Image (cartoon, rainbow, N blue to C red):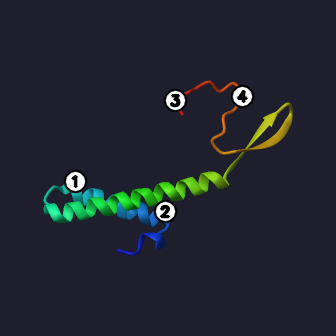
Amino acid sequence: MAKEAELDFEGAMERLEGIVRELEHGDVPLEKAIDLFQQGMKLSQLCGSKLEQVERKIEMITVEDGELRKKPFGSRLEGDNDESF
């Protein structure tokens, strides 16, 4: 496997999906299953980290009082009372 730090998001997701398929198949020896699980956890953390980096870079453009304003991605809009996010 390529080093995780060298993988881009898509490559990490592909490898993670492959690990999941292999584990779901069910005939993986215990030691290999543990190793695959650990690799999957690292890949999952890598993907999460890459997504967080992208979110910090994205800005939303909103209209407030008839003017365009930039807000960081994920900031709440006025009148948005949905607490589920």
Q: How many tags in the picture?
A: 4
Q: Quadrant of the C terminus?
A: top right
- Characterize the local packing of mark 2: few (<14), some (14-19) or many (20 or more) Cα atoms within 10 angstroms: some
Q: First in sequence: mark 2 or mark 1? A: 2
Cα–Cα gap, marks 3 and 4: 16 Å
Q: Nearer the viewer, mark 2 or mark 3?
A: 3
Name above or below for residue 51 compared with residue 85.
Answer: below
Cα–Cα gap, marks 4 and 1: 44 Å
Label placed on residue 78:
4
Label placed on residue 83:
none
Element marked by disc 4: loop
- Characterize the local packing of mark 4: few (<14), some (14-19) or many (20 or more) Cα atoms within 10 angstroms: few
The kind of residue tagged 4 is Glu
Residue displayed at 27% across by 58% down:
37
Residue displayed at 86% across by 37% down:
67
Cα–Cα gap, marks 1 and 3: 31 Å
- Are the residues flagged by discs 2 and 4 in contact, CB closer than 8 Å? no
- Are the residues flagged by discs 3 and 4 in contact, CB closer than 8 Å? no
Label placed on residue 24:
1
Residue displayed at 13% across by 63% down:
29
Give x and y (percent) for residue 71.
73, 43
The kind of residue tagged 1 is Glu
Label placed on residue 9:
2
Give x and y (percent) for residue 1.
34, 74
Instruction: Tell me the residue that label 3 is attached to.
Output: 84
Residue displayed at 26% across by 63% down:
36
- Image quadrant in which you'd find residue 21: bottom left
Give x and y (percent) for residue 45.
43, 57
